[in-house]
Image: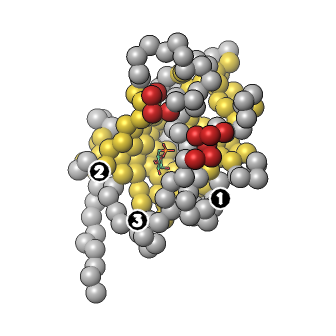
Amino acid sequence: MNYMDPFNSFFNMKELELEPEGDLIARRLSDMQGMYQQEDNVAGNPKIYEYYNVRLPEIPGHLQHCVTVISPGKIGKEYHMTKGHYHEVEETAEIYFTIQGRGKLVMQTKEGDSKVLDMEEGMISYIPPYWSHRTINTGEEPLVFVGVYPGNAGHDYGDIEERGMKKLVVEEDGQPKVIDNPDY
Ligand code: M6P
Ligand code: ZN
């Protein structure tokens, strides 16, 4: 039997970096074209979020895990958010453990049901099979969370890239508000 060796990763809470560095993926506004309602008048190409994947085989049995850091800020009225995705293997779930900041976790099924959960330090959020998921930083500091999901789950961005999500999280009177997406 060829066993994989157990290993630790360390997330540096001061630098907000994973050590040793996994696959670091940074997403800027230009990587999310068409996902925000008002992206036209934004100066430069701000970094919205980055995530660190611990490198693991994409096969059943393993547990993928990664740390996502969403910087605070807004594009128009919408808070910084992730692209959002379904899993390629739709019957796979995911857990998010929030370790810093506050935000919202917006989920949706292909039948059109929507759910929104709060994310705050210490919260463990369960994303059941079949729900797409997007995270939104509604706070003033980075939103940092750990995601854990099956080795073979994969990411399917197609539906959300084409249609967006039914619910948007915007700032109104200084407060986060969940509204219906007028373009959905
Ligand atoms: C979480 C997990 C990852 C995901 C990342 C960024 O860490 O769900 O699987 O890749 O967030 O989200 P997205 O892939 O939607 O950009
Ligand atoms: Zn996922």
Seen at 58% across and 40% down, the residue is: 161
Residue under label 3: 58
> Disc 1 versus disc 3: distance between alpha carbons?
19 Å
Q: Residue 28 carries which label?
A: none
Image quadrant of residue 172? top right
Seen at 52% across and 30% down, the residue is: 33
Q: Is residue 146 above or below residue 168?
A: below
Label located before the other in sequence (2 or 1): 2
Give the secondary structure at mark 3: loop
Mark 3 vs ligand 1: CB under 8 Å? no
Q: What residue type is labelled 2?
A: Gly
Where is residue 97? Give x, y as percent.
49, 50
- As drawn, is 139 to the left or to the right of 67? right
Seen at 28% across and 69% down, the residue is: 6
Residue under label 1: 130
Where is residue 116? Give x, y as percent.
68, 42
Q: Which amino acid does label 3 sit on?
A: Glu
- As drawn, is 159 to the left or to the right of 56? right
